Amino acid sequence: MTRAQGQLAFTDDVSRDLELQEYGLDPTVDSTLLPNAAVMSALQNLVRLATELCGAPFGVVNIISAEYQHQIGAWGVDPGVCSREDSMCAKVFLSRERTVVEDASKDPRFADNPFVTGEIGNVRFYASVPLQTESGFVPGTLCVFSDKTKELRPEQISMLEVLAKQVVELLELQHRTVQLDRTYAELKDSNAKLAAFAGRVSHDLRVPLTTILGYVELVEDDPDVEPASTAAKYLDRIGSSGRRMLGMLEDVLSYSRVGGAIQPANVSLRQVTEEVVRDLGIENDGIVDVEDLTLHADSGQLRTLLQNLLSNAMNYRSPDRDLRVRIGGVANYHGATIFVADNGKGIKPEDRAKVLEPLVRLRRQGDGPGSGLGLATCSSIAKAHGGELSLAETPNGGTTVTVSFPAGL
């Protein structure tokens, strides 16, 4: 082998091991290289079916790395690991063609192989089909073998090829699972960094902003400042803008924290709602009618959700009628679903998906102040619990927000 050929072989081996890792298959000899339990069980069933269809006592799914052969599914033998140099499948799997040998001791490719000579095994009949993915990658083979010579009928060979495709489907399922797990881990890490960043920025901005607002209040209380003067008007604008910015900072911080580690427990919908109503100062207005319901959720995030929805109901009330909000739901072994129905301005069907996005406001005439993060935060809370949030029209006008909290958290 020339130096260039050796370098190419080394590169191919590194690429092979990296590709196996993408499928969740660790190519090192110290690893058992096993997929998850569900895939492992399905692989064993497929290998068993292959041996029965071919009338062979032994069968394995081999994964071949740069240095080793790993048996991740086996029937009739215990799965094991051997060097790639000793592997029978490693000699033929990259051809991407099936291999059927009646007597391996008479085949020049296998006659001196330790699985044939008796050093490791005493294989005579041997049949294998490469496991080729849609991308063209061949991680290994499905093979059946026996210590006695044997022939396969064409239909048996065809069925072995069909089963090999089913093995590939299982490996692709494992591949997608690994990708999803990796994406979830990256998203979780990203959310944690976002929450930390938002916390630092919020703190760094709130301190000077609170100081500014404090001085504004001091100047507003100064008897030398005439209430109707130009200076008083400017101070009022500065104070309004500062308080609005402070509210925006709190909303951003709240939104960034959603989706992290939740601590679900059995909580009372009525109790949490009554706490929110008191915080908003509307407990004596008869605005909110709440049914009692016990649901399994993170109480802090449920509180944030209800506070945002009630604040929205107040901000977007209809000028034609007194505001009324009804809160209730249902709970069973599937989990719980709650609804918050107001009789406000409502949201047009074409705008409902848009208002669930961060920082989106409809900016209609007469709307109250807001950051555009309220409904986005509520949607994130629902997703953090494994549920979803949907918007619909309340009968006779208004918006009904429905949020599901599946069981099993």
Image: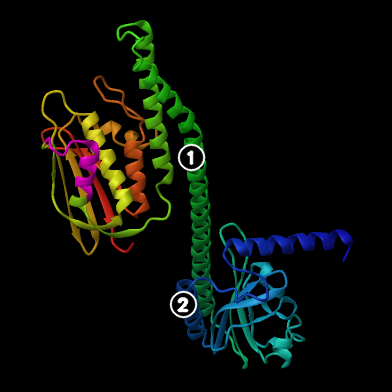
Residue 127 is labelled as none
**384 to 95, vertically: above or below:** above
Q: Inspect the image, locate mark 1, and give the three-letter code of the amino acid beneath it.
A: Ala
In this view, the mark in front (1 or 2): 1
Q: Inspect the image, locate mark 2, and give the three-letter code of the amino acid beneath it.
A: Ser
Residue 356 place in picture, x, y as percent = 34, 37
Q: Could you tell me what secondary structure mostly forms the magenta stretch?
A: helix
Residue 321 place in picture, x, y as percent = 10, 27
Mark 1 → mark 2, Cα distance in angstroms: 45 Å
The answer to which of 193 and 14 lies nearer the viewer is 193
The answer to which of 324 and 26 lies nearer the viewer is 324
Q: What stretch is highlighted in magenta?
A: 272-285
Residue 401 is left or right of residue 221, and the answer is left
The quadrant in which residue 84 appears is bottom right
Classify mark 2: residues with Cα within 10 Å, few (<14), some (14-19) or many (20+): few
Residue 149 is left or right of residue 8, and the answer is left
**331 to 323, vertically: above or below:** below
The answer to which of 23 and 381 lies nearer the viewer is 381
